[in-house]
Image (tube, grey):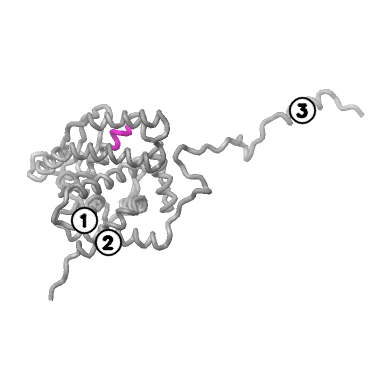
Amino acid sequence: MSIPKALLCLVLTLLLLPKATSGQQQRPKIVKSGSHTAHTRITMSPAERALVDEAILVVCTQAKLDPNGSIAIDDMQARPSLPVHSPEAIAGAARAQRLLPAAKTLVISSVAQLMKDYGLTKSRSATARVQQATSRVQAVTKVKPDMEARDNASVYLNRPRAITFGTLFLAGLRSDEGMISVLAHELMHIADGPNDDLRVLVNAISDRASELTGLEIQGQKAEELTCDLIGAMAVRTFVGDSPGYESIARRLARSVEHNCVEQDEGDDEHLSPRSTIKALLALNPQLVRELVNDKEEATPKRRN
């Protein structure tokens, strides 16, 4: 029996249609540059997780004991606005302006180190993007206090030569280390620029942090975490280059202790403060060891 031509054409047409699942056409899986595939998954051992928890305890204990420790973010948020010409804001602005040149140098070296650590220095395009990022960082010249910004710091990429600091933030960062960490954070935003020139690095860091902690770190949260990591790295180098009478643990803790909050809330663009500390320390085991190994020196001894 012969098959009608119309029926034969219909069968051939159906066979040639693309396959689909659940009503949607299948797409090839895209692996971002710098991401970790399943077979290279990185996890933390129970001992490593315990060390991170111990380091967090050291940081947040120092936040309570250190007279020059940074005020917690939620504490700053609850305070009344601070005028630009208040003594605390003036002192904070002077500290930030004084430390800006050092922070710029530290950010440039930290970005270069991370690019090397994550194996992202092999392409010419990556090298060119880092050079562009470096030029943007070097062009920053000014810290601008702003009462309305309150407990925030920010950069406007259409005005890339200045970092805007809320006066509460200027007053709440009571040490050079605390100020360096926030300056470096904002400078990293400027380094990334309007075209996300360092996105390959941001993706690599957020992928690693997600695997180590189990947190979902994507989009703007990934960039914010990378900025925080640059801040912590900048402080580590700063502490190593400027020895002082205070303990190493106390000085290092100042880079992240503003995240030692009572009310632990994140948002669409940021991890919660406690999750931020967890991710930063998971990414930086050397910082964990330095905090934990130096805690005895940093804790005041009880005298009989």
- The quadrant where residue 303 appears: bottom left
Quadrant the N terminus occupies: top right
Q: Give coordinates of residue 60: x percent, y percent.
A: 25, 58
Secondary structure under tag 1 reads: helix
What amino acid type should be assigned to the residue bearing mark 2? Asn
Which segment did they paint magenta? 188-192
Q: Earlier in the sequence, mark 3 or mark 1?
A: 3
Residue farthest along the top direction in this orientation: 5
- Is 154 placed left or right of 11 in the picture? left
- Is 122 placed left or right of 144 in the picture? right
- Is 244 magenta? The answer is no
- The quadrant where residue 247 appears: bottom left
Residue farthest along the bottom direction in this orientation: 304
Q: Earlier in the sequence, mark 2 or mark 3?
A: 3
Task: Kindly report the distance in space between the C-alpha atoms of the residues bearing marks 2 and 3.
Answer: 72 Å
* Disc 2: which residue: 293
What amino acid type should be assigned to the residue bearing mark 3? Leu
